[in-house]
Image: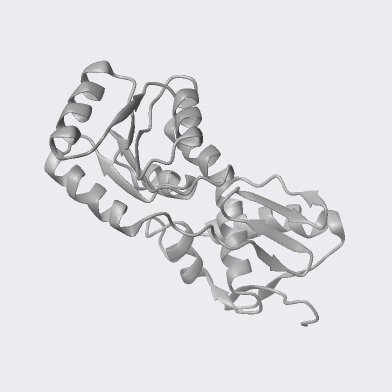
Amino acid sequence: MLVVEDEPRMASLLKRGLEEHGYAVDVAGSGPDAVWMASENDYRVVVLDVMLPGFGGFEVARRLRGAGRWMPIMMLTARTSVEDRVSGLDAGADDYLTKPFSLAELSARLRALARRGQPERPTVLEVGDLRLDPAARQAWRGTVELALSPKEFALLELFMEHPGMVLTRTMIIEQIWDYEYDGFSNVVDQYVGYLRRKIDRPFEAEDLCTVRGVGYRLREPGGR
């Protein structure tokens, strides 16, 4: 197991406590060290703090997934907002535990992750000439890579998982924004507009369609 924690006292407590629960533990104290160690060793699980020197835990998770490293990742953080938890999971974490936590709960969650083993690499999605790699967090139209914000990426991923299907605004809000927005919010319309300006207009395409009074759908190849 790899524990990634830059605060020496917390790192020592985690290492000692987890070793008492039967784990063999290595410790990394920065983002770059974590990426290097997890790339060179086949750890059964990574315990990853969010706030790290070099670069943070979210970036560590993204780089490991982008490099094809699929060991389970448990994210640790003092942050409690839904947005932060979503960011961690979107970056590739498998579970999320907020500080302070009990060692017993951490150990139980780690056992569950270890039993689950390494997840399979997510399938690359393709709809027409749109292609999206959920693991690498990259998307392309033809050979052109698309510069998408995290929310735009999540929205495109949702549409590409359901090509030809009409997605209502409520469905989109529940999937992308959790339950933070009420049904009268125009956040979906705004982000669909942002996405169109990146995936359709520069390519003279009209694949992201409005279904008036209902929602939106991504046109399937050959579809109307």
Residue positioned 44% across, 57% down in the render = 119
Residue positioned 61% across, 79% down in the render = 165
Image position of 65 (left or right of 149): left
- Could you say which is closer to the camera, residue 196 or residue 86? 86
Q: In this picture, is 161 found above or below 10?
A: below
Q: In this picture, is 110 found above or below 132?
A: above
> Where residue 220 appears, x then y in whole percent?
72, 77
Residue positioned 56% across, 65% down in the render = 158
Q: In this picture, is 154 found above or below 16?
A: below
Q: How is the image coloured?
A: one colour
Q: Quadrant of the C terminus?
A: bottom right
> Where residue 114 appears, x then y in whole percent?
30, 52
- Could you say which is closer to the camera, residue 167 or residue 134? 134
- Could you say which is closer to the camera, residue 174 or residue 1? 1
Image position of 149 (left or right of 7): right
Furthest residue in direction top, as rendered: 8
Residue positioned 62% across, 60% down in the render = 156
> Where residue 29 appears, x then y in whole percent?
37, 21
User: From where the camera sits, is residue 100 visible?
Assistant: no
- Could you say which is closer to the camera, residue 124 or residue 150? 124
